[in-house]
Amino acid sequence: MAGVKEVQSKGELDKIVGDGSPVILHFWASWCEASKHMDQVFSHLSTDFPHAHFLRVEAEEQPEISELHSVSAVPYFVFFKEGMTVDTLEGADPSSLANKVAKIAGSITPGDPAAPASLGMAAGATVLEAVQELARENGGTLQGSSSGLDDRLTKRLQQLVASHPVLLFMKGTPDAPQCGFSQKVVDILKKEKVKFGSFDILTDNEVREGLKKFSNWPTYPQLYCKGELLGGCDIVITMHESGELTEVFKDHGVGISDSREAKPNETAGGKGGIAQPSGLSDVLTTRLSGLINSSPVMLFMKGTTNEPRCGFSRKVVEILKQEKVEFESFDILTDDEVRQGLKVYSNWSSYPQLYIKGELIGGSDIVLEMQKSGEFRKVLTEKGIHRKESLEDRLKNLLNSSPVMLFMKGTPDSPRCGFSSKVVNALKEEGVDFGSFDILSDEEVRQGLKTFSNWPTYPQLYYKGELVGGCDIVLELHSAGELKSTLSE
């Protein structure tokens, strides 16, 4: 059983997994350097654990298997035992791979207890040597992601994915697909009656290999809507069968027209705004108004800010975070009454929808355009929405709020520890004007300043934003008659 075997079909894989023995399956790609490195480790492990099956699948060449196991990046490993999937691992992490293999395949020598969870003991000397060698080749670490794309190719791919509202990267053409999976997606798009563009990746190897890295998706076909990846064959089939694909297209005006997101209707006065809701009950209208105004910045989206359920929602969340805006969100997938009602209330048919101070700003395309032009930040300022200050910015502002600044426990009039009291007395005896901050009143500042200054204790005295020191240093300077001069240079 020793050695690595290349899997040629789903049927072959099912047969091997079905016999109940431990199986480790490695999804790899020829273009990914991390895959090649991990393949060497994988090969060594197959020798050290001869009672397990070690299988390889080239992700792009076996899309049925890849999509069955939700492979979206390589290297990727799936672990089977007794015919069941028991674990997975994504990325180039030799130590985790060795330990996961040891866990399901047992000890290296039959009869011996399982080895401790450390790379050297779990995987044997040959694997350890291989990992060390690979780490040296990669400057001390193994990267879990493939190498980056140059700016020219990145720009070309960005232009390609945005060239049509719906774009399919496929093998062949819609009239003559060159693989069954591409054929299935073409058939679904035709059933959905949407206009779509296509690109034959067999005609351009630069695009074929580059798009895998660009999208972090190793197989074809790949379907994009408004520049966002929806997924491959299995995902498209699932979305089509559930009706979600129709809804995504409808939400983004696809199939109705080739225009970008619909703009809010113009009122008689010529200004965009929320149209008077029609057909909504007073109770729902009141509820929607309350939700919209529940936060100065309110995002109605699919999913949550931590787990967006569509690329368009993710894009707006990223923009708000980049702009350091505090906001609340509502997952419209959890409440169909809100989901459908808000479309009528706002006269806006798609999601996400972003509101600032109760006023609809728009969806992902509009928010992105506004950010690029600088208009978004201007609107935030006009609406009185202040950017959330990062902890680092806050600390810098505090440090520079006074030429001499003391971070202490308590206040100068009422110190809460003896060390703080001593520093306050030294500064007063020197006749030094100083500002202070009570770190007991703000845990974020208390913990953050330790890291920022690389100084673990309080009090901390600063001059013009630079750390002078703690209690001992301040008292030494005071005793030597150097404190006042140090704080006035």
Image (cartoon, rainbow, N blue to C red):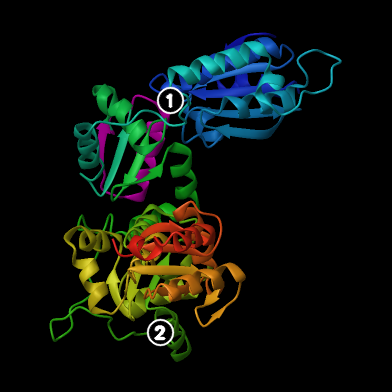
The x and y percentages for residue 307 are 49, 55
What range is drawn magenta here? 174-199
User: Is 17 or 210 nearer to us in this picture?
Assistant: 210
Viewed as shown, does residue 58 lie left or right of 123?
left
Q: Position of residue 137 (x, y in %)?
A: 44, 17
The circle drawn on residue 248 is none
Question: Residue 485: image x %, image y %?
Answer: 33, 62
Q: Is residue 194 magenta?
A: yes
Question: Which residue is the site of mark 2?
Answer: 289
Q: Marks 2 and 1, Cα distance to the nearest angstrom?
A: 48 Å
Residue 336 visible in the picture: no
Left or right: 125 in relation to 147: right
Q: Is residue 360 visible?
A: yes
Relative height, residue 399 to residue 176 (above, below): below
Q: In the rendered view, would you say 8 is above or below 440?
A: above
Write the residue at 26% across / 42% down: 161
Residue drawn where x is 34% and y is 84% of the image: 277
Residue 280: image location, x then y, percent: 41, 85
**Which amino acid type corresponds to the residue marked 1 in the rendered image?**
Glu
Q: Secondary structure at mark 2?
A: helix
Q: Nearer the viewer, residue 353 or 470?
A: 470
Along the viewing direction, whichever of 229 and 123 lies nearer the viewer = 123
The verdict on residue 160 being magenta is no
In the drawing, what numbered circle is on residue 60? 1
User: Dot 2 surroundings within 10 Å: few (below 14), some, or many (20 or more)?
Assistant: few
Disc count in the image?
A: 2
Which residue appears at 53% of the width and 62% of the height? 471
